[in-house]
Image (cartoon, rainbow, N blue to C red):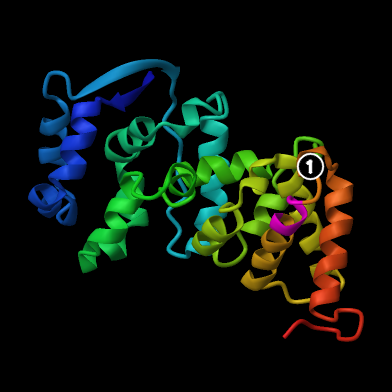
Amino acid sequence: MKIKFLSENTLQDLRVNYDTYKEHYYSKDNTWFNGYFAQEGATFESDIDYKQPNFNFNSDYLVSDFENVKIVYEALQHLTVAEATHERLWAGLAHMQMREFSYYRLSMDLEKKNDKRIQSALFFTHGAKRSLYVHLLARLWWVGYMTDDEANKEDPYWLTEFFSSADFSARCVVFFSSNFTSNRNITKGVLRALITLKNEGFQIKREHFVEANRYLNILGGAMILDMLKEDEVLEIIMARIKKVYNLDKVAVLI
């Protein structure tokens, strides 16, 4: 089986005429969607291999988000970085081959007719980079790609598990909004620093991801961050977080 992309015309039709089609989303109208995508020229088959993954549909997203990062990334690990930036790929998967997952992850939004979230989850409605971490499927692949620790053969997803342990949606946007966290060494160094602090007894919250990003942006004006190794990033971020939050003086972050 091969991955199907939406044609550009189909993508734009669904985006521009969403208000016309939205009732089909609310009602999960598979008959309509199947007929729509069966139209000539609506989609095209790529040469990218595809095997339908077995998603985790746990009612607790804290459980399923982490599991589905692994599932999507492993199923599509053969994608190139360039391929994984295409809206037509992710919108196509969300509407066709992974539609049941879309229904599951958007169940509350579909019920409440939350059009803004439905659209941002299925299409790229933000900037090119931010959209990768807002789209309900793209973000799973990209979090997997950015946090997979290939050097840890026993548990390559230990960083992923930590990242996904709380506020998954918010962390995706907050942490990966910086250009510097496009570098996997920097990403892993920051996560290792936060995990080390957590293991020392400190409660890690969203604000600490924000502070790590803010400090990297400051440092980026004075040094070439891409030259840093993981261990160097770990030391820099640990020192910064401890200084800002007086962690040498308190046992738990407030």
Please name the residue shown 77% across and 63% down the image.
194
Question: Measured from the top left, where is residue 233 in percent x and y?
Answer: 83, 51
Question: Measured from the top left, where is residue 40 in percent x and y?
Answer: 12, 18
Please name the residue shown 51% across and 47% down the image.
68
User: Mark 1 — residue?
Assistant: 224
Residue nearest the viewer, comparing 104 with 114: 114
Q: Quadrant of the C terminus?
A: bottom right
Please name the residue shown 27% across and 60% down the image.
116
Q: Quadrant of residue 230?
A: top right
Q: Is residue 120 visible?
A: yes
Query: Is residue 52 toward the left or the right of residue 99 in the image?
Result: right
User: For the view shown, which residue lies furthest in the front direction?
Assistant: 222
Q: Residues within 10 Å of mark 1 (few under 14, many from 20)?
A: few
User: For the view shown, which residue lies furthest in the right direction?
Assistant: 248
Query: Is residue 229 toward the left or the right of residue 62 in the image?
Result: right
Please give the count of numbered marks on the rendered protein. 1
Residue nearest the viewer, comparing 24 with 64: 24
Please name the residue shown 38% across and 50% down the image.
126
Question: Measured from the top left, where is residue 163 in percent x and y?
Answer: 65, 57
Question: Measured from the top left, where is residue 164 in percent x and y?
Answer: 60, 58
- Mark 1 element type: loop
Query: Is residue 149 toward the left or the right of residue 210 in the image?
Result: right
Q: Quadrant of residue 213?
A: bottom right
Q: Is residue 104 magenta?
A: no
User: For the view shown, which residue lies furthest in the top direction?
Assistant: 47
Q: Quadrant of the N terminus?
A: top left
Under mark 1, the amino acid is Ile
Residue 81 sits above or below residue 20 on the image: above
Q: Main secondary structure of the magenta part?
A: helix
Q: Which residues are magenta?
A: 217-221
